[in-house]
Image: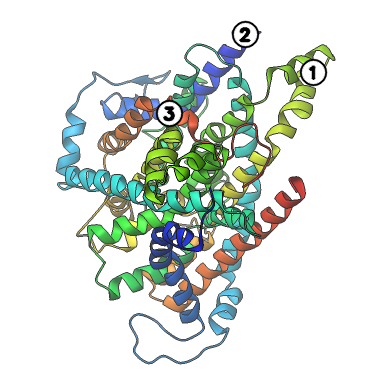
Amino acid sequence: MRAARIIAIAAVTGAFLLPLAWTGLAAVGVLPDDSTRPPSWTGPPTLDHIAEIGVAEPTFWQELATSTLAAILAACLAVAAALPAAFALARSRFRGGRTATQGFLVLASLPVMAYVIPLADLSGRVHLIDTFAGITLAEAAVTAPLAVFVLHGAVAQLPPDWEEAAVIDGAGLLRILGGIVVPLIAPSVAATLVVMFVLDWNMLLVPLVLTSGEVKTVPVALSDFFTFERELDWPTAAAALMVSLAPLAVLVGVFHRVLESFALQAPGSRDIG
Amino acid sequence: MRLTRRDRLVLFAPLAILLGGWLVIPALVGLGATLTTYSPLTTAVAFAGWRNYTDVLHDPQFSEAVRNVAIFTLVAVPLELGLGFGIAYLLRRPFRGRSWWRGLLLLPWLVSPIASGVMWHYLFGGATGILNFILGWLGQPEVASPIGDVSLALAATIAIEVWRVAPFVTFLLLPGLVAIPQERWEQATLAGASWFQRIAKVALPEVAPLMLTVGMLLTGLSLGAFDTILILTGGGPGTATLTPALYSYDRAFVTNDWPSGAASAWLIAAGVAAVGAAYVRISARWSP
């Protein structure tokens, strides 16, 4: 029974990772050869294609740096803005409080397309087009509602006793938030940061419409390549895909334990929001 | 602790600035602008009433887009929830290295929607693809890429989306399944429940509220399906994979018909708001 389950898990994982393995092989120059019967692979493995990325897209490494920095800042900004609000929501008993929390989830589900057209127009008018700050702030705003929803769940689970004790000791709001609440829900905060980073890193529409090409993230560079019909060689494209996936894979690998604390709903609770 | 009105104001201020400036105000200004003839390139602005909206709603292309996204959502979301739940169910009991498997399984979701479009363009393709390689091994003739076929393109985009999102659903559902107390499973087993009954009587009732929340997220994101399709088919062949988000993007940024673009984008928002209202109502009934 147990062995059967492990085999099933391995089979499912294998099936889901097969397309990525195929891409990984192509990135190191191991390509399918359909002319033989049965089909075979060409080889030997090489790292040349990773160097070719820089030839096809000379600014690729710079775009990688832009993506990284924008995603880090946007994730921190979103969490920093969401955390106090989540705390306030969890510790206030007002009518419609739960609907307000659920409203943040609906906002998190709202496709960016719904408001990005006027956002691009307004950003242009206040000269935030083609700026790193403009892209970072807009990315943070896209992901902040989800952060509020998740962190609200984490705070709501905390018994308020610790905070009460601190209030009696005369601690101020910031001390309570930074010194008591954040350390107690640190795993959730870290997990939220990682998920926000992934979402920001992969975001296309926001950085696409907020740039005319001066400040580009990796997804924007990818879309440029394909919408302007400049087809890349498959091994080069595969290498670029693998290089842009690698930071996320490493991040999730390092934080795989912390990510277990990312819960849309407090485990064991049947409440929604 | 007891929060005063001033405390609450301070605590909500950063979020209000961020969401106000970069989400709410643009959205509302956009809504106002769609009731006029406003466009960033024109100077003369006149009141237009609902005309931008009726224009979009009468556009056969937009109807096609709505039909496609309805099929996309109705097929993709249940598949993502079902598959994601199934995999989470396999992972529910602790075993050595579970959290590694969990991380490995999350990999498809880490591929950005746009990178997934690029990747599948080649994976479905002739000389580079995985499809013809497998068919070759089975001794079958090669097939053309499904993304170029009017009758298969939408199904192919759905399959790609399910591949990318189902692992994320597993990631979101697993904490809920893990939290079910061991006794509940044991009781069910002692009562002679089959695995199917254990799922229906123990697992599903416990994770139903969580699945509702995940379903809300997935539905909203499906209604805005954009990135992968932009790269893979650009909405084609013909209008086979056109979605409202692609339609809005094309109007606003490619053909420079800003009012149609902004108005159709607001129709997406209206769709998500309707789903959101249903979500709030259902959840109120489930946990009063």
Q: Earlier in the sequence, mark 3 or mark 2?
A: 2
Q: CA separation, marks 1 and 3?
A: 31 Å
Residue B176 x/y as whole percent: 62, 31
Task: Please state which of residues A115 and A31 is positioned toward the viewer in this rendering.
Answer: A115
Residue wearing tag 3: A258
- In percent of the image, x 67 and y 42: which residue is there? A271
Q: Secondary structure at mark 3?
A: helix
User: Can the viewer see residue B118?
Assistant: no
Amino acid carrying mark 1 in the image: Ala
Q: What residue do we see at 59% from left, 27% from top?
A: B88
Whether residue B168 sits left or right of residue A29 in the image: it is right
- Residue occupied by mark 1: B188
Distance between the alpha carbons at the discs numbered 3 and 2: 26 Å
Q: Nearer the viewer, residue A147 or B223?
A: A147
Q: How many callouts does the rendering have?
A: 3
What's the amino acid at mark 3?
Val
Residue B267 % position (x, y):
57, 68
Nearer the observer: mark 2 or 1; the answer is 1
Query: In the rendered view, does A266 fall on the left or right side of A163?
Result: right
Residue at the spot 56% in from the left edge and 79% down from the top edge: B55
- Residue receiving disc 2: A2
Give the secondary structure at mark 2. Answer: helix
Q: Marks 1 and 3: same chain?
A: no
The residue marked by circle 1 belongs to what chain? B
Marks 3 & 2, CB-CB < 8 Å contact: no
